[in-house]
Each structure stands twice: as C-alpha cells, then as structure tokens.
Image (tube, helix red, strand yellow):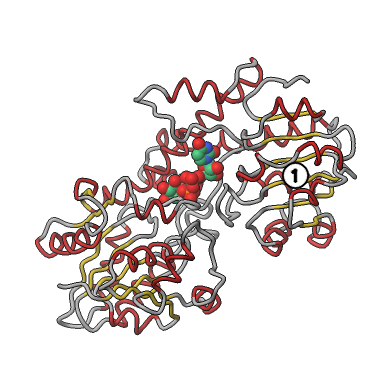
Amino acid sequence: MVIRKICCIGGGYVGGPTASVLALKCPDIEVTVCDTNAKKISEWNSDKLPIFEPDLEDIVKLCRGKNLFFTTNCERAISEADLIFISVNTPIKTFGHGKGKALDLQHVEDAARMIAASSKRNKIVVEKSTVPVRAAESISHILKANQIDGISYQVLSNPEFLAEGSAINDLLYPDRVLIGGGDDSDSVDAMNELSSIYKRWVSKEKIITTDTWSSELSKLGANAILAQRLSSINALSALCEVTGADVNQVATALGADSRISPNFLHANIGFGGRCFQKDILNLIYICECLNLPEVAHYWQNVLDMNEYQKNRFARKIMRSFYNTVHGKRIALLGFAFKKNTCDVKESPAIYIAKMLLDEGAALQIYDPKVEESQILKVLSKPVTSNDSEIVQQAITVFSDAYAATKDTHAIVVCTGWDEFTSLDYKKIYESMLKPAYVFDGTNVLDLRELAKIGFHVESIGKGPIVR
Ligand code: UDX
C-alpha cells in the first residue's frame, strides 16, 4: 500500500503537533486532523491555535491548506485515508469499575467504531493514545466485528513520547520511534509502511519494532520510571532541607554517573501534566487486576511521594505565616504544570492555590501563557470549603509579574518560566508589603541574591538561606 493520505483522529496535545510534523516532513502526503469538537477545529484553522508549543504555529502556517487540514468531517477524513492515527484522550475513569485508576477508553472505542463505519477499503490503524496493555487487541475486535466484506485492518501500536513544551523538537528529533505489531506478514508489511514514513527524518537505528503488547507496556513503563526518578530526587530534597545539603549539588553529583545521567533530576514542588499520574494509576490498576499487589504498591509509593512533596511545600508556606494566611495577599507566579506550555493539567500550582484559598488568602496570579478563564475554571471546582463565587472574589489574574506582585506579602513561584529568573526583584521587593517572602517551588531562583535584597526565602531541597 502506498500511503498518500493520513488521518489523525483527535486534535489535542498529541494529534495536532504530530500531524503538523508529519505534514512538514512528508510534503507528498496529505495529513488531515479530524475532531468532533468544532471549537477546537476552528481554532486550529485560525491564527490562535488551541495549544501553545514552541515552533508549532510556524509549521501550521507553512503547511495548513497545502497538505495539512483540520476538519470536523471525520467520516470523510477516515474514508479517504490510507493510514489512521488514533490520538484521542484517554482520561482516568470517573465512574464504575476501576474508577479513579483505570483508563476510560470510550474515545478510543468511538474512534474504532467511526473507522469501521467510514472505511470502504483496507486501512492501517495506528494507536497513538496512551492505552492499557492489550488495547490494540480490543480495537481490532471492534474493527473486525464491524468490518465490511473484503476490507482488512492492520492495527499497530506506536506510542508517542513527546513532552509538552518541547513537542515539536521531540517529534523532529525523537530518541526512538516505537512500533508494535503482530508477526504475521500483513502486520509486518504495515509496520514497514509506518517505518518508511518515519525514516524520512529519523535514522533507522532509532526505529524499534516490538510485539504490540510490549510496545503498549513500554509507554506506561517509560512514564512510570521517569516519574519514579522525580519522586526519588524529591525524597532526597526533603532530606537535604533538614540536613542543610543542597539538592541541586546532589543532583549534579548523581547525574555525573553515566549510569544515572543528569536528566530528570531537577527537584521541585512535584510533578504534574497529563501523563505521569494517569499512567501510574493505570499501571497500578493493571497490577491489581493481575494479582500483583506488591508491584501495585511499589508504583503507588511514587504517587504518594509526589503528594507529600506538594503538601510539604504548602505546609512550609503556612509555617512561615504562623499557620495563618487569612487576609494575606499572595502572588502566584506561574500556573502551568511546567514552563513553555499553557497546560494546567495536574499542575502543582492548583494544589497550592487551593490550599491558600481555603486558608483565606487573596491570590494575585500571573502566568505568561495560561488564560485567566482557565485559571478561574480550575480553581472554582469545589475541592476547597469555599464556594466558587468566594473563590473568584479572592483571585485576581494579572498580565505581568510586576503588577501581580505589587502590594503582596509573599511570592510563590510555581512554574519555572525563564522570565522569572530575570525579573527585577529589587523593584518587586520595593513594591511589596514587609516582611516580604519568596517561596521558590521551582528551585530555579538565585536565593542568595534574593536574600541579599531583603526577602525571606524558602525553597525546595536547601537548608535555611540567611542574609
Ligand atoms: C511526559 C513524558 O516526558 C513524555 O514522554 C510523555 O509522552 C508524556 O508525559 P510531559 O508531562 O509533557 O511529558 O512533560 P515532562 O517534561 O515529562 O514533565 C512532567 C513533569 O515532571 C512536569 O511537572 C515537570 O515539571 C516535572 N519535572 C520534569 C521535574 O519535576 N523535574 C525534572 O527534572 C523534569
């Protein structure tokens, strides 16, 4: 089969950037993103894309209308495509069996049913969403149970390892591309087709082929191990704080060991994002279902340590104010779950903001990329004892860091945006109420410099900083 047209079902954080890079690297292939969410599609077709990713806009502008299209007409996009990526979201189930742990595969199933209903010839179907082990098998079942005579489907697993904030770079220069499939000749042919697309810009040594289940499990395993590293360095950060060691120096020393490597050793307020917590919960659920309680317990500890880290930092803020922040004005710098993204999914900033609001503080929030409506939406969800109206009254969202910090008692840095390291903290100090505090949850500020200016400073993984 010669691949002339590709369809990506799902225009989210994975589907949009993936389709854009495919279109950029394969000018002879028409790539169409389809999504039933009309608002999202109209944003993809506008000047203001629904997600922010460095370099994404340039690529979309270059390819859109030429070989990159965004549409709500999924039926047509699917029927015309030779190869279909399923890149829909797979949230944690909020109901029924496996509630709070298992992945909700409703959107994957809907996509499979849509493919079965709209296909009039053979298709390669590629599962890109993070899914539980053996999900490809259930996609195959749905397709086979609904297939029209004479049509065949090859279902492959091709998990996406891109991280938000570096999606384009990760897609252009991946560490590896993983393709899982069966060992029959049709499946091998389909794997070769998919490989040949990636080979246009990825060297063949980086393309790994495995069986389907190994590929699916590798995705869950990669995220679990990355998160486990973070919980390990965060656990050490707690030890550093009570003993006076500096976790950044410890991380440098650890990372110099080539077996450990320096990546993913930056201690901070805790990890967030769309994948780590969700995938570990799913892994725990799978282990419990397969009667592996010790393994489930091991991964649960990774999540528990992350909760402990966020809670420890929140308690640190409270302790500095003698356990009462009622009536205090506190600036939150950063709301996204990490820098270079507008995504707030599982952002530690939400945890901190809710705790401060619940204690009666007023918040002045600034994030370079997160929209005010998004901040108000997530903070108004009733997790605190306040009702949403009171919460909204207690929050003001600003469009720059200087305005957000003016007349506040404290600054809490929740996201490590580069611009926060180069702010004029002298000017900020002068505009604040005294004593002025900085709580650095990102571990990126020059604490000694801040202490010299006059701030009381607290951070992650360091003993007390004295002036
Ligand atoms: C992650 C995986 O990296 C990616 O491969 C997968 O496809 C999706 O999940 P993402 O969540 O977008 O990507 O971002 P990532 O850069 O991995 O950061 C996740 C969290 O870890 C963030 O909260 C980040 O602040 C935190 N982190 C990362 C640290 O706390 N310290 C570090 O050293 C690195």
Q: In front here: 298 or 405?
A: 405
| Quadrant in the picture for the C terminus | top right
Taking the image as shown, residue 333 lies to the left or right of residue 101, namely right
Quickly name the residue at label 1.
355
Q: In front here: 333 or 129?
A: 333
Q: Residue at x 50, y 29 (%)?
A: 232
Could you tell me residue 212's position as x and y percent? 24, 54
The quarter holding residue 455 reads top right
Residue 44 visible, this orientation = yes
The quarter holding residue 287 reads top left
Residue 279 visible, this orientation = no
Q: In front here: 35 or 262?
A: 262
Is residue 425 depicted above or below 189 in this figure?
above
Taking the image as shown, residue 118 lies to the left or right of residue 232, namely left
| Quadrant in the picture for the N terminus | bottom left
Could you tell me residue 176's position as x and y percent? 29, 47
* Residue furthest left in the image: 185
Could you tell me residue 135's position as x and y percent? 33, 59
